[in-house]
Amino acid sequence: MISEDTIGRLFWNRVRRYGPRTALRMKRTGRWQDISWEEWGRNVRRFAMGLAALGMEARDKVALLSENRPEWTYVDLAVLSANAVDTPIYPTSIPEQVEYIVKDSGSRFIVVSTEEQLEKVREIKGRLPGLEKAILMDPEGEHREEWVLSFAEVQELGDARGEPALFEERLEAVETEDLATLIYTSGTTGTPKGVMLTHNNFISNARGVLEVLPITESDIALSFLPLSHSFERLAGYYALVAGGGTIAYAESIDKVPDNIREIRPTVMCSVPRLYEKMHARVLATIEAGPALKKKMFSWGIGVGGEVSRRITSKQELPGFLNLKYKVADKLIFEKLRQRMGDRLRFFVSGGAPLAREIAEFFHAAGILILEGYGLTETTPVISANRPDAYKFGSVGQPLPNLEVRIAPDGEILVRGPSVMKGYYNRPEETREVLSEDGWFATGDIGYLDQDNFLHITDRKKDIIVTAGGKNIAPQNIENLLKLNRFIEQVCIIGDRRKYLTALISPSFPELEDFARENGIPAEPREQLVEHPRVRQIFQEAIDEANVRLARYERIKRFAVLPVEFSQETGELTPTLKVKRKVVEARFQEQIDRMYAE
């Protein structure tokens, strides 16, 4: 067996080992289609040789603008096997963002998924003198420009003019500390920075993850988070390759619930918003049912919660409690697990904080959500709860191959083989976060408890300091409010002000259902969110949260917005974190009204 110290060599070892076994699954024309390890390898090799025939040299940059699909991995593995560097771009990016990344990275080629993505490149091509070719994955569409090729044409070029010996030579020439990718941080503030991640960064992090989250040949994961983000790329892709599991690509975010039932995944990565929506959907279903069903559900959750607490603290279950749980499981929880395919070993949550109440709710139902923590700059996983050691409300214990310590001001610092090489062409900004002895400053505030579980209290830059000098972590309050099924997103305001306020982006499907049931016009939304009955819903949510907060943390006023925050309109990052500065700038008028005397 050859060494597995680069992503390319790891992948090709798995191709040799698993051959005809299913590696990838993709739904096309309404049916799930299987792709074997051998077929995966053939597609990667053909595309790599096609790129080489087009003149791609070692260390060249190749941009990748695509949704999750098998071809994304073909491009990624082809580029990395050929000793080049890829630059993934979120498919939700606007043309100006694509232009910035292609220009800053110096990409010679860009691979796009659809005609829609190609149109973005057409719009900016005249401002990108260094961009030589665009390659379109989809076979449909008019792309007769000289600088555009189809994916199939590049593979055919690899068949006709590719040199197998050159491919093997380049694969072997890659060194473990060579640059593998530039991932541009979406960030909640500022200009995106290209995070330089090496082969060793990914390989070491995948090994660390597999030590605590065992993934095996029998596992199948449903992938829907963007592969352009380091979380899905490592935990939902490279870790599955290393463990020999199967990856199924969801049709879209909206289709995830259906695809879960069809694929019946054993493991799955997601951001907290999916779990929050699942939780809200369960509560909405119960709320719409008869009084007896509500009472039974309330009883079952109580029983499940007690069982969860005893399991978490490693206490034995008394016989009568065990009997009650079996009844609750049969009547309530079994149906919920069936919606998840009924063979899920665990969910992994990352990208943003998960409310403890959500983790406890699902655990009561026999569904384990393991929250982890990391950043793009740490490739990304720093810590994770694990199936045999977890604490809800924490982000788990640090990976075995990483060191974590807390700075005097509470900032979390990390050192180890998965810490980035630096920011591309930004030495000064690299020095601001990466010390000479290798400690990376995460920008997050937290602490390690007596059992070495890491707890995040907030982002350093998000801490609100009120006019009275009180330090407040807004994410904790926002997570509390998002437990309400009518609230999709919320942004707490209050820095250097006398009191806290909240900008609420409603869950319009839930709100419109409520409106129809109560004879309230659902359109226009501007009138819907100001209707007294609707305002009452959100006032009650605020009041309920305020009871659980310290006096200085309580929300005095709120505004319900007639719009949903989204990536497309710029208020959310790809992992659905709120971009506070964008939100505050866009809704300045509403904020000013909340602070008017």
Image: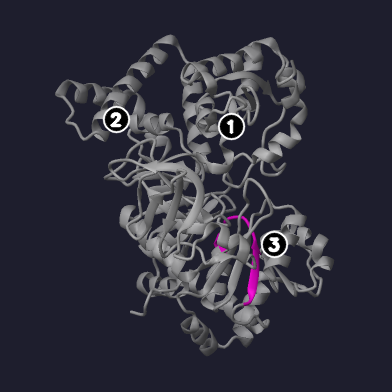
Whole-percent x, y for residue 512 in the image: 65, 21
Quadrant of the image occupied by residue 11: bottom left
When the figure is inspected, residue 452 is found, relative to residue 276, above or below; the finding is: below
Tell me which label, 1 or 2, sits earlier in the chain: 2
Q: Nearer the viewer, residue 7 or 294?
A: 7
> At label 2, which amino acid type do we have?
Ser
> At label 3, which amino acid type do we have?
Ile
The image's colour scheme reads: one colour
Foreground: disc 2 or disc 3: 3
Whole-percent x, y for residue 299 in the image: 33, 16
Reading the image, the residue beneath label 3 is 101
- Label ID, residue 308: 2
The span shown in magenta is 60-72
Residue 61 magenta-highlighted = yes
Foreground: disc 3 or disc 1: 1
Foreground: disc 1 or disc 2: 1
Tell me which label, 3 or 1, sits earlier in the chain: 3
Whole-percent x, y for residue 34 in the image: 47, 60
Label 1: few (<14), some or many (≥20) within 10 Å?
some
When the figure is inspected, residue 357 is found, relative to residue 244, above or below; the finding is: above
Judged left or right of residue 511, residue 327 is: left
Residue 585 magenta-highlighted = no
Quadrant of the image occupied by residue 536: top right
Residue at the image position 39 percent from the left and 11 percent from the top: 292
Tell me which label, 2 or 3, sits earlier in the chain: 3
Reading the image, the residue beneath label 1 is 465
Q: Is label 1 in a helix, a strand or a loop?
A: strand
Judged left or right of residue 324, residue 133 is: right
Q: Nearer the viewer, residue 93 or 492?
A: 492
Q: Nearer the viewer, residue 445 or 140?
A: 445
